[in-house]
Image: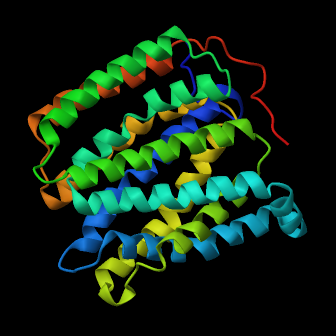
Amino acid sequence: MAPRTRFHIPREGRSLGLLLAFTGMFLVSTDSLLVRFAEKDSDVDGWTIAFMVGLFSMPVSWGIAARSLGRDTLRQAARWRRPLLATGILGGIGTTSFLTAVTLTTAANVVAIIASGPIFAAALARIVLRERTSARTWRAIGLVLVGIVVIVGGSIAGGGIAGDLVALMAIMVFVVNLVIWRRNPDLPRTLVVAVTATFIVLVTVAFADPSLLDGRALVATLAMGGFFGPIARLCMSTATRHARPAEVSLFTPVETVAASLWVWLWFDEVPPTATFIGGTIVVAAVFYGLTGPAREVDPEPPRQT
């Protein structure tokens, strides 16, 4: 009898980066469900949801940063102030855009647009980082695009164009952040998460109205801000140390499929048949793009000090 192959959790290299990317996107997929949970039977809006998420996330993420960096926290923050400022502002805008988009249109439509991330990531990484994306990854991206077209074609709701545009802004901001993280591999990821939480609050505080929150919305935003959000951002930002932005962003369809499933099961927000067909194409494309051998991989990502 042939010996059974044991599964080992990767601790370094591309495999670790891909595992972190999958984990991060799977955790992010719960946001759509929790936003719907917060909205139910209340008048809470996207600005308020994002504000509370940032508010709950700040003590958790700064606590993690202080725990990991210790007395070096302020020195590291000062050393990396420029990329931290850039990624914090972008993260604040991106998170707010995503959460707001879910309140403006169907969750299936938002996450379908989010799934276009690999296309933007591959193009931007090629321009900014001069990273050559493998032919296999480009073919996978092409298949992902086909799946997105099928999903969007069947899930765009009438009058949801505002939500579509805000979702597009969210994914473009996320992709720029992927490139920043890849360009600065030594940037402390715990500080990235903490600064992002701070900027979510700063971006939304002028427009938020916490008086709209009920007990259900408080629980939902606490779950997003105190647990799912910080861990997901830590996973995604760390993934770019080990894998290229184009490969990391290939996991955005994980959110597309999972988020659509969550809101369907819990709130009967049934995606159209096209979403199931497109989702199958997307999952197959991601599997194809990530199961082949890594090609054209640089020994180390570009460094920025």
Where residue 25 sits: x, y (%)?
A: 46, 45
Q: Residue at x 57, y 17 (%)?
A: 133
Q: How many marks?
A: 0
Asked whether residue 8 appears in the rendered view, the answer is no
Q: Residue at x 62, y 15 (%)?
A: 132
145 horizontally vs 10: left or right: left
Q: How is the image coloured?
A: rainbow
52 horizontally vs 3: left or right: left
Against 99, residue 298 (above or below) is above
Q: Residue at x 31, y 45 (%)?
A: 111
Where residue 66 sits: x, y (%)?
A: 77, 69
Location of the C terminus by quadrant is: top right
45 horizontally vs 160: left or right: right
Asked whether residue 164 appears in the rendered view, the answer is yes
Where residue 209 sits: x, y (%)?
A: 37, 84
Where residue 29 sits: x, y (%)?
A: 37, 50
Q: Residue at x 40, y 25 (%)?
A: 286
Nearer to me, 129 or 137? 129
Q: Quadrant of residue 80?
A: bottom right
Q: Quadrant of residue 266?
A: bottom left
Nearer to me, 80 or 33? 80
Against 8, residue 256 (above or below) is below
Nearer to me, 3 or 67? 67
Q: Quadrant of residue 73?
A: bottom right
